[in-house]
Amino acid sequence: MILIAAGGTAFAYLTGNIAYFADNVGFLFPSSDEWISGRLWSLCAGVGLSVLCAVFVNYLNKSFNIIRHITWLFAGLFILMQGAYPSVMGQLYDGTLMCAMLLLSVVPLFAAFQDPRATRMVFLTFCIVSFGSLFDIAFVGYLAVLLVGCLQMQCLKLKSFLALLLGILTPYWIVIGSGAVALSDIRLPEFVSIFSSVPKGNALIMLVYAGLTMFLGALTGILNLIKVYSYNARTRAYNGFFLVLFLMSCILALADYRRFAVYLPIINLSSAFQIGHFFVINGQKRSYIPLSLIIASYIAVYWWSILM
């Protein structure tokens, strides 16, 4: 799936079918789409970071036994979803960066399960996401998701709550206190309609692509709840966090619709997790048939985007 997605994205780049999203000026520092000037190198970075996210989510499952099965299915589905709309995978931008940093923040969060003394873990979780907000204000919405995650991990006491606040403040404290930036350097995001930031045909494909991903993630996430309730408290908390992450990402994308594309990679990741989990726990019920239909649907979306 990595070879298919990367190859398809490279083909889209060569045929001029990568729709570059409207520039985001960043919040305190330049956003990631400004880090690399060459589009070929941006393509390599976008593909590479997507692959790293796929590998890392598999590492999370192995380390924390999230779904009680060892499988590469949701990692493969994620990379396939990324490649289905080449504009998402074919460039380095804040969406892929946010997906990677949120995955990093999950490690200390999960490690703090039922440990109110794990203040360092809570601090690190929120510090990572707060650091990301220096580049894109979209990270701020995920601070609320992580707060819910702390409640699910049963690690939120007074000391950990203070660590949470310090984690949010520390990146700003460092960059402003050191004189690296001034408060006057804060740049509010430019709100541009999705239909203005990319060609209208591509915007329609993007919405269909995102709608398919949201529908499949919501459907399988609801069906997974029946099985998740039979797990122990730790595994329920881990799975519950990924479901909250998916639902909140969809809500944030719809609320901040002018910057819809920024939320696509994390929606892909959390949806792929739900879909992969569903097919793993229902692996003996001819699951290859609906799974093949899902893969075919994303391949169809890819060719639609190429032929437009």
Image (cartoon, grey):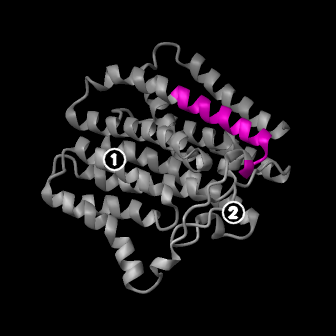
Q: Of callouts 2 and 1, which one flags the residue occurring earlier in the amino acid sequence? A: 2
Residue under circle 2?
A: 42
Does 64 lie within the magenta span?
no
Q: Residues within 10 Å of mark 1 (few under 14, many from 20)?
A: few
Task: From the viewer's perspective, tell me whether residue 33 is left or right of residue 128.
Answer: right
Label total for image: 2
Residue 269, image x, y percentages: 51, 42
Q: Residue at image x 50%, y 49%?
A: 55
Identify which residue, 136 or 104, lies in the foreground.
Answer: 136
From the image, tell me which residue sits under label 1: 63
Query: Where 213 sits versus 108, above or below?
Result: above
Identify the residue shown where x is 85% and y is 37%: 307
Give the overall secondary structure of the magenta segment: helix
Q: Is residue 175 left or right of residue 197?
A: left
Which quadrant, please, contains the C terminus?
Answer: top right
Above or below 235: residue 174: below
Q: Give amino acid for label 1.
A: Ser
Instruction: Say which element carries label 1.
Output: helix
The range drawn in magenta is: 196-216
Q: Decide: is 90 above or below 32.
A: above
Distance from disc 2 to disc 1, alpha carbons, whole Å, reads 31 Å
- Disc 2 is placed on an element classified as helix
Q: Residue at x 57, y 61 (%)?
A: 189
Point out residue 278 in the picture as x, y percentages from the top left corner: 44, 25
